[in-house]
Amino acid sequence: MFKFVSNSEVDTLNFAKNLAKQLHTGDTIVLCGELGAGKTKFTEGILTHFNLQNEISSPTFTIINEYTSSDINIYHFDVYRLNSVDEFYAIGGEEYFSKGICIIEWGELIEDALPKDYIKITFNKDSSNENVRILNIDFIGDSKLDLCLGKE
């Protein structure tokens, strides 16, 4: 496990941009944490790396937003409103894993449908400072990303 302390939204954006430099088609990132913890801001950082920052919107009511840069597809899921993993399968969610980079908010709700290799990032608010987030990063399976975090 790796731990990153974000002191601001800018820190969260930069962390995500640095991670995005290492992402490829087939990579999946699962984002966990309470409402307002920074999951969508993190996704904005990834999209910024691919020059898609003006495209972001929360997929809360659509389940998935699809973004295409010149060289990669990014699929941003929000599975909070799904009642079961069966609904994820019903929309063909698992078919996206090999088509691009998948970012799944509330992915712990569909754990049985996730690929065997993924990165799980859990966002925790700091009770003493409303701007601070503690991000706990777990590599599930054989995820091989070499995190060069904290570096531009």
Image (cartoon, rainbow, N blue to C red):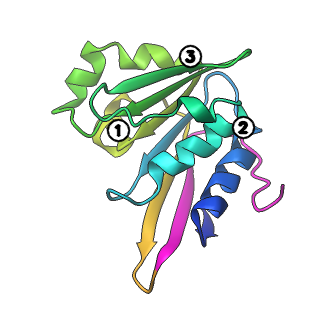
User: In the rendered image, which residue does mark 2 sit on?
Assistant: 49
Position of 116 with respect to 14 (left or right) is left
Front one among 146 and 106? 106
User: Which residue is tagged 1?
Assistant: 111
Q: Identify the residue at the far right of this view.
A: 152
Outermost residue toward the bottom in this view: 128
Q: Quadrant of the N terminus?
A: bottom right
| Mark with earlier residue (3, 1) | 3
Q: Amino acid at mark 2?
A: His
Q: Which of these two is toward me, 140 or 124?
A: 124
Is 136 magenta? The answer is yes
Quarter that holds the C terminus: bottom right
Residue occupying image coordinates x 28% and y 41% = 109
Residue extent of the magenta highlight = 130-152
Q: Nearer the viewer, mark 3 or mark 2?
A: 2
Foreground mark, 1 or 2, reads: 2
- Disc 1 crowd rating (10 Å Cα; few below 14, some 14-19, many 20+) is few
Whether residue 150 is situated above or below residue 117 in the rendered picture: below
Residue occupying the far front of the picture:
54
